[in-house]
Image (cartoon, helix red, strand yellow):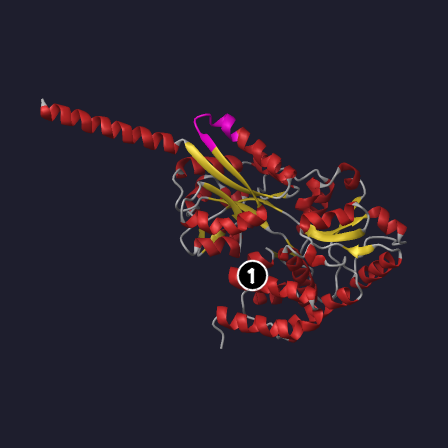
Amino acid sequence: MKRIMQAGLLSAAMLAATASVSVQAGTLAVNIAFKGASQRTVWQSTLDEFKKANPDVELKVAFVDEEAYKIQLPNWLSSQAPDIVTWHNGERMAYYASRGLFEDLSGDWAKNNWNDTYASSKEASSYKGKQYAMPTVYYSWGMFYRKDLFTKAGIAGEPKTWAEFMDANKKLKAAGISPIAVGGRDAWTLAGWFDYLDLRINGYAFHQQLMNGEIAYTDPRVKKVYTTWKTLLDNKYFIDNPLSYDLDAAQPFVFQGKAAMMLMGTFIAKGFPPKQAAVMGYFQFPSMDPAIVGAEEGPIESLHIPSRAKNKVDARRFLAFVGTPAISAKLAEGLGSLPANSKSAPPEEPISRIGFDILSNTKGGIAQFYDRDMTKEMADEGMKGMQKFINDPNALDEILAQLERTRKRIYKKS
């Protein structure tokens, strides 16, 4: 009888443990970075659709503002990791994959036919030949502008060359309008300026060498990027005190007609108030050297399963669901972006469509963005340097010398 009771207790314990695992396996923890109400809304709608199609899965969702998300992600991945995280492809993804913090998704790529539908994003989703990301959307970067302010300043059309761009800045300033808004408190907004100036002045191959730590920051070609940038600052073509504003605080300068242009990704388009959206245009960053084949920024957003995730089975179900052409298209439309899935319908939103055409016709290469193409530590120091430069352009030589010392230390250059 004692043995029977012990066996019964053991059996009950095993059943309880199994039930506990079952309950845990049915809860999917998802952490999502967002910027603005429209981005949160489209993600919530997508989660609702997944729940409807998978009623056995309980969702535990955390929406975190993008800037706070960047800070918190490393702690999540190394401790109590959720089952799904949103993040970025390229070096940003490789940073965590190389440390064993992202799950290998190569099997999912084969099973779900992603090698075909996400062929153009496969390289950016890979680390040492294995895939650690499922791409969701990508987006174009370019110049947003107020059409009515261009007309008021006597600007005939969208600037296609640097000379035309500088002439437009001059006319806007003469009309009492700040030509360019930038939220430099978010250092990555400055990185967009550095990237485009470097891509236009030095080209894609040089840019990637710099991102890989192969070019000295004291190289005259790097300095030329900053001295060109300094011309815009010296002419006061940016809003006053740009380091006082983040992206959200800088956009109202454009909405209120105080500034005419902003270099930014198409993802902000969905957040425009209807009245402002009607007068907004978007054009490709101007060319600067006819000998340089144009390259663009086309950052890819992605989903990942942390290696410490507890519910990898349902996490894979979620990735397969989001990776369908219909959901990819829906996310892209709601996020003001382009679907990474090649089988999805192209966007209908006008500015996203312009961005789609720009990237589709790019012949010089597509970069992932400054802090996504470069190792994190160097990118962080580089963007701090950009903020110092905006604060004091005359300290350029000192800033570049410091960045070069940092490059040698990080990349172990003699």
**Residue 364 visible in image:** no
Rendering coords of residue 46 (x, y %)? 56, 33
Rendering coords of residue 120 (x, y %)? 56, 49
Front in this rendered view, residue 305 or 290? 305
Front in this rendered view, residue 83 or 182? 182
Quarter of the view holding residue 296:
bottom right
Rendering coords of residue 175 (x, y %)? 89, 55
Q: Is residue 356 above or below residue 129?
A: above
Quarter of the view holding residue 9:
top left
Quarter of the view holding residue 275:
top right
Report crowding for label 1: few under 14, some 14 to 19, many 20 or more residues within 10 A (C-alpha): some
**Residue 193 visible in image:** yes
Residue 285 in the magenta stretch? The answer is no
Query: Range of the magenta residues?
Result: 50-59
Q: Is residue 96 above or below residue 219?
A: above
Secondary structure type for disc 1: helix
Question: Image point 85% across, 51% down: which residue?
Answer: 150
Q: Is residue 330 left or right of residue 323?
A: right
Rendering coords of residue 153 (x, y %)? 89, 53
Residue 51 in the magenta stretch? The answer is yes
**Residue, disc 1:** 380
Front in this rendered view, residue 355 or 166? 166
Question: Image point 48% across, 53% down: which residue?
Answer: 126
Q: Is residue 235 above or below residue 361?
A: below
In the rendered image, the quadrant that contains the N terminus is top left
Q: Is residue 353 left or right of residue 158?
A: left
Q: Is residue 41 left or right of residue 323?
A: right
Q: Is residue 13 above or below residue 82?
A: above
Front in this rendered view, residue 4 or 363? 4
Question: Image point 69% across, 63% down: which residue?
Answer: 197
Residue at the far top in the pictured view: 1
Q: Amino acid at mark 1?
A: Asp
